[in-house]
Amino acid sequence: MKTVVQRIIDTTLPHHCLLCDSRHCQNQPICQHCHAALPVIKHACQQCGIPLKREQARCGRCIKKPPYYSTSTIPYHYEHPIDRLIQALKFDAKIGVAQLLGKQIAKQRLNHGSTPLPQCIIPVPLHRSRLRERGFNQSLEIARAISEHLDITLNYQSCQRNRPTATQTSLPAAQRSANLRNAFSAVSIEEVDHVAIVDDVVTTGHTANELARLLRRGGIKIVEVWAAARAGR
């Protein structure tokens, strides 16, 4: 007998590839050919995840002004066709995409992470008005998949979004920090000192950094950022 989650996945997974319309998907949102063509990040700053032209530990910006989080695990460039997959997840409720992306994040963290896994993962919260509008939080769905693959506790109650915010990419650089000021709140997590923040896309990095700042202030010692895709500067 299928579980409720499996029935939901069965109804949200397409019977054809979301990218090329092939019918050879093997119960996945995309076919093997399109999966192999996804834009993998080859070199990235280990701290903020920004794509780099060559291998180096940290980018110049992180050396000059390190963010509050220590490392990033982000497998893909935010460009075609990853952008289409994430849009299908967010706006067409293709929850199977979250399963795919969560699995890829988990695999990269296992293969390339040099530190122990965090004790829990925290999805970037949506404001309740956006949650009502969309019906689900795409970051939470990705985090669920990661939690299943890595057997890590999923904590979606410790961080809340207090007010709606403008999309960071729509704002000039000087306004991005102000846009997130007092946008989030976080409570202390007992007996936990190592967490990972989970998002679908890291664009400017300000959202992850603000959440990491609050978590560090609440007693967390190590904060990682895990996301499916990273936009360039």
Image (cartoon, rainbow, N blue to C red):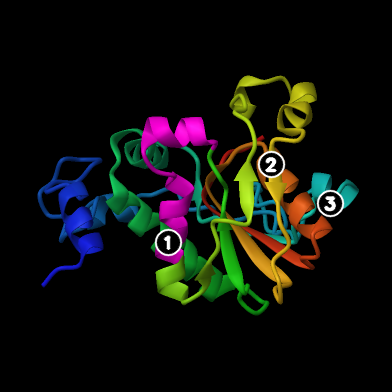
Q: Which residue is mark 3?
A: 66
Where residue 65 sits in the image (x, y, percent)?
87, 47
Residue 144 shows which numbered tag? 1
Q: Nearer the viewer, mark 2 or mark 1?
A: 2
Badge 2 local density, few (<14 within 10 Å), some, or many (20+)?
A: many
SS for callout 1: helix
Spatial CA span between label 3 and label 1: 29 Å
Residue, far right: 64
The residue shown at (70%, 46%) is: 185
- In the rendered image, which quarter contains the C terminus? top right
Q: In this picture, which residue range is highlighted in magenta? A: 127-146
Left or right: where 11 falls relative to 214: left
The answer to whether marks 2 and 3 mark residues whose Cβ atoms lie closer than 8 Å is: no
SS for callout 2: strand
Where is residue 118, by image quadrant? bottom right
Q: Of residues 159 and 172, which is closer to you in this image?
A: 159
Q: Of residues 1 and 61, which is closer to you in this image?
A: 1
Q: Which residue is mark 2?
A: 184
Q: Report the number of numbered marks.
A: 3
Q: Earlier in the sequence, mark 3 or mark 1?
A: 3
The residue shown at (17%, 47%) is: 14
